[in-house]
């Protein structure tokens, strides 16, 4: 990719970031609009998933006069390793695990590690999460895309560089609930072995498969050349607790763990207790009720006639679809929020946002008007930042 093309692509990523910054402001001042692309996820299984944490204060479960020392909790790291070995069929060990309080902190640690180790340029498969784009921009690290299309689009064929580098990819493509195809991950693995490159997988929305298929294909990337970000709070859609972890090459565990603790400090003891609870549930494959609830919500939305088109989802709790209702009455995130070309009128829909789903169903036009919308007539564009 030439210099001018790289600069244009980098500019595209940062323009995407500006849209996220704009909608965050709009979210705080909705002016009666329902935010159908929001981040939260209510469901009826919270107390079941929390167990004793739902009823007991943390100080009744452990000593709150002490730092919780998450990374020193070898029982937790061993439990996480065993959980991934069982789910993914890969022999992870405690020396591959960096536990933390949430995905965002681990993204910050990773980007700071890049900077400390002299990486001023990385490559990426679009899309990337906006917080990672923010960190790359603020730390002055150049992001170079290796594709224009996204994994769920026809003709997706990334051009991996013929050099040793760091590649970032997001699996699944969260806003559309689509996995990165196995063939792409196999090509990435072959490329890693050939070039010695390091791959960072943002797997924040992994382990929410609609088909019940266990494990994640990204686990088959070379373990000693791959970092995988996993987020149990997303697995259970309980975001008020903060728990995430990195699966890392053995040689990087200590440097990353030291950097993380010095950057962020220890977590609250409640988050440490939740991390154990979440790992126990993941060991037992315990989010089937949540996934069933997500699928039920999707079926109800589709059956209502509120959608003119959709990208078929297979995981997670977001749907990328074109509502029949006029988008002017909603806050919604379209293709331009994900560095995506095409898909006019499609927006991210949170399938766990009951208020948003009800608003989309209630706002659907009459059958005659819906027929026109299905032909693409009169579909409005999303509002743009000033």
Image: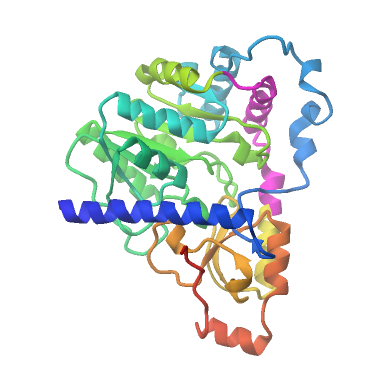
**Residue extending furthest right?**
55
Q: Which residues are magenta?
A: 266-293
Tally of marks: 0
Q: Is residue 193 left or right of residue 328?
A: left
Say which of 103 and 319 sits in front: 103
Answer above or below: position of 209 versus 325. Answer: above
Answer above or below: position of 370 versus 183. Answer: below
Q: Residue 149: where, in percent of width, then height?
A: 34, 59
Q: Is residue 308 left or right of residue 247?
A: right
Q: Residue 97: where, in percent of width, then height?
A: 48, 22
Please report the residue visible at 51 percent of the width from the left and 23 percent of the height from the top: 264
Please report the residue visible at 73 percent of the width from the left and 60 percent of the height from the top: 355
Q: Residue 283: where, in percent of width, then height?
A: 62, 29
**Residue extending furthest bottom?**
368
Q: Residue 344: where, in percent of width, then height?
A: 45, 72
* Quarter of image, res 340: bottom left
* Quarter of image, res 16: bottom left
Say which of 139 and 278 sits in front: 139
Answer above or below: position of 177 versus 34. Answer: above
């Amino acid at each position: 990719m030439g210099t001018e093309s790289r600069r244009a692509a980098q500019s595209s990523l940062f323009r995407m970031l500006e849209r996220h910054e704009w909608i965050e402001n709009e979210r705080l001042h909705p002016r009666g609009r329902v935010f159908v692309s929001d981040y939260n996820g209510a469901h009826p299984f919270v107390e079941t998933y929390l167990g004793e944490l739902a009823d007991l204060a943390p100080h009744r479960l452990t000593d709150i006069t002490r730092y919780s020392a998450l990374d020193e909790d070898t029982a937790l790291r061993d439990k996480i390793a065993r959980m991934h070995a069982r789910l993914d069929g890969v022999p992870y060990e405690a020396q591959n695990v960096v536990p933390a309080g949430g995905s965002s902190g681990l993204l910050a640690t990773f980007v700071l590690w890049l900077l400390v180790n002299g990486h001023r340029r990385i490559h990426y498969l679009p899309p990337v999460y906006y917080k990672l784009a923010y960190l790359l921009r603020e730390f002055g690290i150049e992001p170079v895309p290796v594709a224009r299309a996204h994994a769920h689009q026809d003709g997706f064929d990334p051009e991996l560089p013929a050099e040793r580098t760091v590649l970032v990819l997001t699996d699944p493509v969260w806003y559309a609930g689509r996995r990165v195809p196995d063939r792409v991950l196999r090509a990435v693995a072959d490329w890693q072995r050939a070039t010695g490159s390091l791959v960072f997988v943002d797997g924040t929305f992994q382990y929410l498969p609609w088909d019940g298929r266990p494990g994640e294909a990204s686990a088959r990337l070379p373990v000693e050349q791959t970092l995988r970000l996993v987020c149990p709070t997303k697995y259970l859609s309980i975001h008020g607790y903060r728990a995430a972890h990195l699966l890392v090459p053995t040689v990087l565990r200590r440097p990353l763990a030291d950097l993380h603790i010095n950057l962020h400090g220890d977590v609250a003891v409640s988050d440490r207790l939740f991390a154990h609870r979440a790992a126990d549930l993941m060991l037992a494959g315990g989010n089937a009720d949540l996934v069933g609830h997500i699928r039920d919500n999707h079926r109800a939305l589709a059956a209502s006639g509120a959608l003119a088109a959709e990208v078929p989802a297979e995981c997670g709790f977001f749907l990328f679809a074109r509502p029949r209702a006029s988008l002017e009455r909603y806050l919604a995130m379209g293709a331009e929020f994900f560095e995506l070309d095409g898909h006019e009128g499609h927006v991210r829909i949170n399938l766990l946002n009951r208020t948003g789903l009800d608003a989309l169903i209630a706002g659907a036009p009459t059958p005659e008007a819906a027929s026109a919308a299905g032909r693409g007539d009169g579909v409005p564009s999303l509002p743009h930042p000033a």
